Image (cartoon, helix red, strand yellow):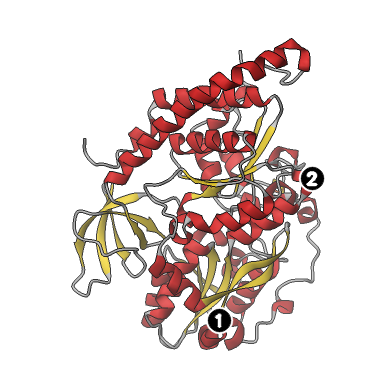
């Protein structure tokens, strides 16, 4: 055995078959359709990549919720980054933010207009860039959920050059679960929480949510067995009417989470209300720099003129985008009239077609609905 | 952006701030500011956007596999109880319109 983390152990077909059989019996015994929601793009990727929907029984719906940080980055947030690039700043961001449409332009457009836009793999690369170019203003357009925000917090705490600042579009997942669970028409009976976010926050964070909404939550990893076991466990909790939290990813997630990381996160960020693209205004859904960090907050350092880069033209195609409805669990990508036609990964109309964690992009890459039952 | 892949720590920088980590043949430098416990050479860590976010104790892998087996066992036990529920359904209470073929 080459390593104790032999991925194949978590893809063992025999265990997978056994789990899938147990899941089928469990759902059949429920005698009705059960709808579950996961809130993580990586789970949709795992489900699509391993064809797991084929292993799910027919009356089990596993819906992708607002689990793609890029997809829920709001249009005005993109406009701010585009405006900063137009105003002469060097804007650094994660790769999948580049094509995300703003009101009328994306950062890729800003780049072709001559703006300095740089894709980085890590926020520390953006800090390095600022060190190398002391005469420029380097702005890190920060996206991602709490796990990613911890990295942003860490670089600020370890000291950044004066010409470096942060434009935060970081989001906080637990807040969005509250909003989605309140949308009665979705009828979600259980949530699958993202394993790596819980690595930081701990699974204990979901306990108040489960108790308040009377909805069970299972924390899951990203290998086929992780997902199957989590779904099975969640269906069992639903059937037993036990609104509890269960950790199906103990190799990475503890109840308390990563204490030192959480301490760093809350030293730098605060939760504030914010709009999630296409979904709703999410109270406590955005992570903004605390006032002690005003000196590195791009929103405080610059007068950002978004009127100059957007708002003028009306994007008629974008008005047909139903990303928000999809992320609320009320529609599927194939329900969108633009899917795969006007809207494609090379010419995205909506945010869900941009990121590798967006449901429309994932369905497109894996050839339409990733549901082998339809062809089997 | 965020699939957590474990990698093996090959070396640690002199100031202890970063590590050279091997991800199934691909080497990357990871920062160590936010990892939950101190790491040493040979440890496995989870990477997220260039930062180690957790040291994975090897015994926890076994723990997860044991969990899968336990879930299966419980599912089998629960299934016996489900038998009479299914009996009721078969007796004409409706229920699932399509069985698994
Ligand atoms: S296919 Fe494109 S336009 Fe339609 S919902 Fe998805 S991202 Fe929006």
Q: Are marks 2 and 1 in contact (CB under 8 Å)?
A: no
Q: Chain of mark 1?
A: A
The residue depicted at 56 percent of the width and 55 percent of the height is: A206
Report the disc number at residue A290.
1
User: Is any part of residue A70 visible from this angle?
Assistant: no
Is residue A6 shown above or below B72?
Answer: below
Q: Nearer the viewer, residue A171 or A246?
A: A246
Q: Nearer the viewer, residue A119 or A5?
A: A5
The secondary element bearing badge 2 is classed as: helix
Is residue A128 shown above or below A175?
Answer: below
For label 2, the crowd category at 10 Å Cα-Cα, with few meaning under 14, some 14 to 19 and many 20 or more, is few
Report the disc number at residue A325.
none
Q: Chain of mark 2?
A: A
Is residue B93 shown above or below A264?
Answer: above
Q: Is residue A303 left or right of residue B10?
A: right
Is residue A147 shown above or below B86?
Answer: below
If the image is split into quadrants, where does the N terminus of chain A sit? top left
Report the disc number at residue A185.
2
């Amino acid at each position: 055995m080459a390593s104790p983390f032999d991925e194949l152990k978590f893809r063992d077909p025999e265990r997978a078959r056994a789990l899938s059989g147990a899941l089928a019996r469990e759902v059949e015994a429920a005698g009705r359709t059960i709808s579950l929601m996961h809130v993580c793009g990586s789970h949709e990727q795992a489900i699509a990549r391993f064809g797991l929907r084929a292993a799910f029984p027919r009356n089990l719906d596993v819906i992708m919720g607002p689990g793609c940080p890029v997809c829920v980055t709001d249009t005005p947030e993109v406009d701010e980054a585009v405006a900063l690039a137009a105003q002469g700043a060097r804007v650094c961001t994660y790769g999948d933010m580049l094509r995300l449409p703003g009101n009328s332009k994306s950062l890729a457009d800003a780049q072709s207009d001559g703006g300095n836009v740089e894709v980085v793999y890590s926020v520390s690369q953006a800090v390095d860039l600022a060190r190398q170019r002391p005469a420029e203003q380097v702005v890190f357009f920060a996206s991602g959920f709490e796990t990613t925000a911890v990295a942003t917090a860490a670089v600020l705490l370890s000291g950044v050059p004066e010409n470096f600042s942060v434009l935060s579009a970081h989001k906080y997942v637990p807040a969005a679960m509250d909003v989605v669970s309140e949308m009665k028409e979705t009828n979600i009976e259980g949530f699958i929480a993202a394993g790596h976010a819980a690595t930081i926050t701990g699974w204990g964070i979901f306990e108040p949510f489960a108790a308040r909404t009377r909805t069970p939550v299972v924390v899951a990893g990203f290998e086929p067995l992780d997902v199957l076991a989590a779904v099975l466990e969640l269906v069992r909790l639903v059937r037993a009417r036990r609104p509890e939290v269960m950790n199906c990813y103990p190799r990475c997630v503890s109840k308390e989470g990563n204490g030192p990381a959480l301490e760093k996160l809350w030293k730098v960020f605060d939760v504030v209300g914010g709009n999630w693209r296409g979904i709703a205004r999410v109270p406590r859904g955005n992570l903004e720099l605390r006032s002690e960090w005003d000196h590195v907050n791009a929103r405080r350092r610059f007068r950002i003129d978004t009127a100059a880069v957007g708002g003028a033209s009306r994007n008629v195609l974008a008005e047909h985008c139903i990303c928000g409805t999809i992320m609320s669990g009320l529609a599927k990508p194939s329900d969108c009239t633009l899917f795969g036609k006007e809207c494609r990964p090379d010419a995205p109309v909506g945010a869900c077609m941009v990121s590798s964690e967006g449901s429309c992009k994932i369905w497109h890459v894996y050839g339409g609905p990733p549901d082998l039952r339809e062809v089997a | 952006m965020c699939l957590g892949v474990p990698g093996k720590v090959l070396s640690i920088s002199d100031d202890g701030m970063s590590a050279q980590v091997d991800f199934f043949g691909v080497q990357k430098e990871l920062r160590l500011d936010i990892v939950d416990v101190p790491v040493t050479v040979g440890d496995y860590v989870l990477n997220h956007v260039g930062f180690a976010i957790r040291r994975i104790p090897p015994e926890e892998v076994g723990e997860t596999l044991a969990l899968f087996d336990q879930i299966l066992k419980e599912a089998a036990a629960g299934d016996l109880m489900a038998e009479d529920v299914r009996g009721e359904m078969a007796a004409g209470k409706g229920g699932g319109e399509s069985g698994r073929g």
